[in-house]
Amino acid sequence: MIDIVLAVLKYAWPWVLAATIWGVQETRIGVLKVSLSASHKREIVAQSLLDASRQRATDLALLWAATLPKIDDAARAQEVKDHAQIESLQQRVDELSRAPTLHFSGLAVGLFDDISTFANGRDAAPARASASGPAAVPFRPGAVYSEADIVEHDRLAGAAYRDAVSKLNECRNLYNEARNAQLKVNTP
């Protein structure tokens, strides 16, 4: 009986070996197909997420593009309104007396100059220390101004301040609109 089994194995051995190799290869190919299928599914999901993020970015850019002209138009309208109001104030300034009736000391004139220098973005001249200890204020001769001069200066300062406030509000509005647009796009 052993002779029969050995004879069968002698002739069947290549066929058993081939079947085993074929089975192992088929199993390996099946595992690769499953792995490729899962990888393909992940690729499809990643591509859909990429497409969705591109669409959100496009939507956000379109919302910002639609928002900017509205904010810019509102800011321009406010600027025109502000300039008209400042000009109406100029007419009232022109009605004031130009007679030199207000006298300021040299210290006050120096302070006015330093404030103006600082407000225009330059550093004021530093006060020099005197031998007695406290900081010395440089002497400037006194000046005499009219009411109109003082009020005109105040009008110009008010116009500059109003312009700065308008620009600040424009920046805030732009930020808020952009943030709201982004929230709108990112909200599912």
Image (spheres, rainbow, N blue to C red):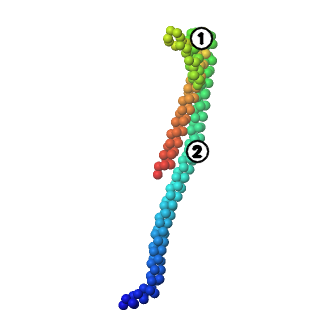
Identify which residue is drawn at 61% across, 21% down.
90
Q: Is residue 116 above or below residue 44?
A: above
Identify which residue is drawn at 56% across, 32% down.
167
Q: Position of residue 83 (x, y in %)?
A: 61, 28
Quarter of the picture containing the N terminus is bottom left
Q: Can residue 78 be seen from the camera position used here? A: yes
Q: Amino acid at mark 2?
A: Ala
Q: Nearer the viewer, residue 109 or 33?
A: 33
Query: Which of the two marks, 1 or 2, is nearer to us in this view?
Result: 1
Could you say whether the residue bearing mark 1 is in a helix, strand or loop?
loop
Q: Can residue 151 be seen from the camera position used here? A: no
Q: Nearer the viewer, residue 134 or 146?
A: 134
Pointer 2 residue: 65
Report the disc number at residue 108: none
Q: Residue furthest left?
A: 1
Pointer 1 residue: 140
Q: Choose top left, top right, bottom left or bottom right for residue 146.
A: top right
Q: Position of residue 99 (x, y in %)?
A: 62, 10
Identify which residue is drawn at 53% across, 56% down.
51
**How busy is the neighbourhood of tag 1: few (under 14 within 10 Å), some, or many (20 plus)?**
few
**Disc 1 versus disc 2: distance between alpha carbons?**
54 Å
Q: Amino acid at mark 1?
A: Arg
